Image (tube, rainbow, N blue to C red):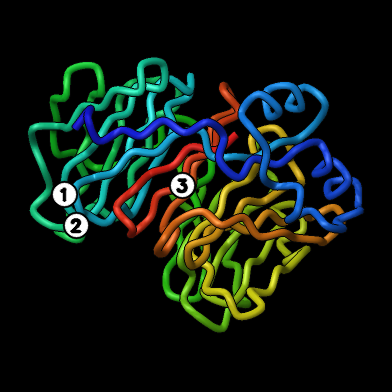
Amino acid sequence: MQDDIEKFGDIASLDDNIEQFLNGDGRDLYGAMRQTPAEHQKDSSKGFTFGEVGCIRTRNSKVTCCHFSSDGKLLASAGHDKKVVLWNMDTLKTQITPEEHKLIITDIRFRPNSSQLATSSVDKSVRLWDASDGGNAQVRFQPGMGQLLAAASDKIVSIFDVETDRQTHAFQGHDEMVNYICWDASGGLLASVSQNLVKIWSLATGDCVQEFNSNGNQLHSCVFHPNYSSLLVIGGISSLELWNMAENKSMTIPAHDNIVSAVAQSSATGMVASASHDCSVKLWK
């Protein structure tokens, strides 16, 4: 598996002109996307950059989900091959868990501040894994931290109080099935993604406070950028959409050769990861 790793020198990275995008001026940004690795290192200190820094391929198996550990040292991914792949961010080496689900893995999440991670599967089971030794046990899922739990079912996003087991919110407004949900860093906003629309919900008011239309693209996943709270990274068909919510402007980054099924971020490293049905996971920064 280690031989499959491809290291990239910041392909399609964005120079400090993207700072204009975050400040409201999005002119001619696509033409500024190509630069050498040395230029990227030099310009990265001046402002926001976003470029591919690594890629792992999973031997012709579609990747459906990925997640960073709290310290940013591990990235876990999974999908159609029913196994968990652990990616060491320091060495860029990988390890595959010996055990597996019976069917496709649909989601993966690290327990906060822990090497334990949970996976859910089409086989209707949830498993708890320990990245430090690869062992596993089948258990009921419990959030490691946080009072609220978000869950999407069909076109509705529900919020539950974990301690009281009570539903506190029911967000409705999508006209298609919700594919993906994600919290912002403060826990005050929740993004929900359907094929044609992204909605931003406020827990304080219970209302949708902002929307992003797909404009013909098919949307599948999203994550708030670890360093820019007003920037949402949205996975579509082969591309990433960077949505500046403060200015309500967006730009498109070519990323994969198939659906971007999941995205993840690490506040510890500033990394964003994208997983795709093209059998790869890519790193961006």
The residue carrying pointer 2 sits among few (fewer than 14), some (14 to 19) or many (20 or more) residues within 10 Å by Cα, namely many
State the image quarter where residue 110 is shown.
Answer: top left
Q: Which mark is residue 104?
A: 2
Q: CA distance from mark 1 to mark 3?
A: 18 Å
- In front: 103, or 183? 103
- In front: 273, or 16? 16
Q: Are marks 2 and 1 in contact (CB under 8 Å)?
A: yes
From this view, report whether residue 207 is shown above or below residue 196. above
Residue at image coords 22%, 38%: 84
Q: Is residue 224 left or right of residue 68?
A: right
The residue mark sitting in front, 1 or 3, is: 3
Residue denoted by label 3: 274
From this view, report whether residue 285 is shown above or below residue 176. above
Q: CA distance from mark 2 to mark 1?
A: 5 Å
Residue denoted by label 1: 82
Of marks 2 and 1, which one's residue comes earlier in the chain? 1
- In front: 6, or 68? 6
- Amino acid type at circle 1 is Lys
Q: Quadrant of the C terminus?
A: top right
- Amino acid type at circle 3 is Ser
Residue at image coords 80%, 31%: 47
- Amino acid type at circle 2 is Ile
Q: Secondary structure at mark 1?
A: loop
User: Could you say where residue 189 lies in the image, as x and y percent from the top left?
Assistant: 68, 50
Q: Secondary structure at mark 3?
A: strand
User: Could you say where residue 126 lies in the image, as x and y percent from the top left?
Assistant: 22, 46
The residue mark sitting in front, 3 or 2, is: 3
User: Could you say where residue 154 lies in the image, as x and y percent from the top left?
Assistant: 43, 75
